[in-house]
Image (cartoon, helix red, strand yellow):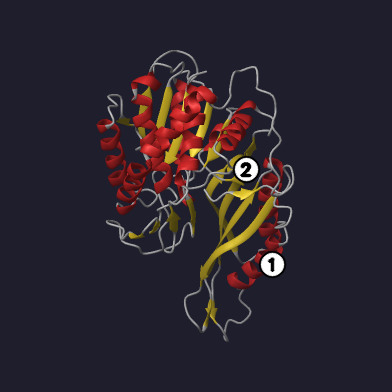
């Protein structure tokens, strides 16, 4: 998740307006909890960073998260969680508390993004004081480490005694890229089969202590392949050229998005084709990443892309579509009690709450009518999805404190 402020919510950079407490009892931790929970965040700061580094050192590319999943599973068992298990798709699942009331669900994704060709194994981590550099150190080493911290705190007697609803902690597979939110989809599918309807969902994703992601950016990822007979670039100069046809398609597709309004953004992200410098290509393909906050607009663009291909493909070429991923868009209104609880928790740790939009495991929950947000887990960072990713632990307590306050209060209400 790389969160951006949402310019259409209440004005870019403006504070989100506080609303009255909702009838469902969702609120942030009050004064009676506040200092004790802050003390817990301070006490766990170094431990959380140690876990963050340990997890980041074990590579977890999308589709190959098992080694990191075993580390998370071991850490949860060491935290005293007898219920921890791996589900059918490789998610690490843990349950705190008992009861039949709708549970609170906290998710953090296991996988990270690495450059093409990066080996699977140990990831070099470089630390200079509070600054740590490594691919995946923030996204989502930070979120996973915070999930482990939550497990320790939820087992603490003074917290466990006040839990009024179960808390499910889930480390998910397949959140990034072509993982297509696979782990979250599987967990919610299984929950639905078992008749479990979550009270609320928090995706713990990356660093941060101010943004509240309640706009879920949906996406449609598509590969368009064109094939033809090809031939010698001089002798068969009349042959239809797949790259030429795709060039016209690219130009037309780029005009479908609006990078300023950001309700839908269209980018051609990769292309490949041709067999020789001196031959008309027999095949070529492009990949398109369509993102947006409006499910209706996303669907319209998806249909228009297919119409463009039909119109721009010469009769002697064949066009093929391959769907690489679909992520549902969704939104939770700023007035919703869950968002307002996050606002209060953010203010309680001295930060300015800001509305944001991103893609995370929360997308799946929102698409199914379940209240969900995504939050950072403290500290600052940058360079996500690159080899130069970094994380700064200087002010980590604020975001960790915010997360702890929100989770404990939601579970105690």
Name the residue rendered at 60%, 65% in the picture: 317
| Quarter of the rendering containing residue 95 | top left
Above or below 167: residue 377: below
Residues at marks 1 and 2, CA–CA distance in whole angstroms: 41 Å
Quick check: 219 left or right of 111? right
Quick check: 263 left or right of 324? right
Residue extending farthest bottom:
234
Name the residue rendered at 42%, 27% in the picture: 168
Please say whether residue 188 is visible from this viewpoint.
no
Label 1 vs 2, first from the N-terminus: 1
- Give the camera-side residue of 261 and 326: 261
Query: Which residue was labeled with disc 2?
Result: 352
Where residue 131 appears, x then y in whole percent?
41, 58
| Quarter of the rendering containing residue 173 | top left
Density class for disc 2 (Cα within 10 Å; few <14, some 14-19, many ≥20) is some
Where residue 391 appears, x then y in whole percent?
44, 55
Above or below 122: residue 316: below
Callout 1: helix, strand or loop? helix
Where residue 366 appears, x then y in whole percent?
59, 33
| Quarter of the rendering containing residue 28 | top right
Density class for disc 1 (Cα within 10 Å; few <14, some 14-19, many ≥20) is few
Callout 2: helix, strand or loop? loop
Name the residue rendered at 40%, 63% in the picture: 116
Please say whether residue 337 is visible from this viewpoint.
yes
Query: Which residue was labeled with disc 1?
Result: 251
Residue extending farthest top:
100
- Give the camera-side residue of 191 and 396: 396
Report the mark closest to the observer, 1 or 2: 2
């Amino acid at each position: 998740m790389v969160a951006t402020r949402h310019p259409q919510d209440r004005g870019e950079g403006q504070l989100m307006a506080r609303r009255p407490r909702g009838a469902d009892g969702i609120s942030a931790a009050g004064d009676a909890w506040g200092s004790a929970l802050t003390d817990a965040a301070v006490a766990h700061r170094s431990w959380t960073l140690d876990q963050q580094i340990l997890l980041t050192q074990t590579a977890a590319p999308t589709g190959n998260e098992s080694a990191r999943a075993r580390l998370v599973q071991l850490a949860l068992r060491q935290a005293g969680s007898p219920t921890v298990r791996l589900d059918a798709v490789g998610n690490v699942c843990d349950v705190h508390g008992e009861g039949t009331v709708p549970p609170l669900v906290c998710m953090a994704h296991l996988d990270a993004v690495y450059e093409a060709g990066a080996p699977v194994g140990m990831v070099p981590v470089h630390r200079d004081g509070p600054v740590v550099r490594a691919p995946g150190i923030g996204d989502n080493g930070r979120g996973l480490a915070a999930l482990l911290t939550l497990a320790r705190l939820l087992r603490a007697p003074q917290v466990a005694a006040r839990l009024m609803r179960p808390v499910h902690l889930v480390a998910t597979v397949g959140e990034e890229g072509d993982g297509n939110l696979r782990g979250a989809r599987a967990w919610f599918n299984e929950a639905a089969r078992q008749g479990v309807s979550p009270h609320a969902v928090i995706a713990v994703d990356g660093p941060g202590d101010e943004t509240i992601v309640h706009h879920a950016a949906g996406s449609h990822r598509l590969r368009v392949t064109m094939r033809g007979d090809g031939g010698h670039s001089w002798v068969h100069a009349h042959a239809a050229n797949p790259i030429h046809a795709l060039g016209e398609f690219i130009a037309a597709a780029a005009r479908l998005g609006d990078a300023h309004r950001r309700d839908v953004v269209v980018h051609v992200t990769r292309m490949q084709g041709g067999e020789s410098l001196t031959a008309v290509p027999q095949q070529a393909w492009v990949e398109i990443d369509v993102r947006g906050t409006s499910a209706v607009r996303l669907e319209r663009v998806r249909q228009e892309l297919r119409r463009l291909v039909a119109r721009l493909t010469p009769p002697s070429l064949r066009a093929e579509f391959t769907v690489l991923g679909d992520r549902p868009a969704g939104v939770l209104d700023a007035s919703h009690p869950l968002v307002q609880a996050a606002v209060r928790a953010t203010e309680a740790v001295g930060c300015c709450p800001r509305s944001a939009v991103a893609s995370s495991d929360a997308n799946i929950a929102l698409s199914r009518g379940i209240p969900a947000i995504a939050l950072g887990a403290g500290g600052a960072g940058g360079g996500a999805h690159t080899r130069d990713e970094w994380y700064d632990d200087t002010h980590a307590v604020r975001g960790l404190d915010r997360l702890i306050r929100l989770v404990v209060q939601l579970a105690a209400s």
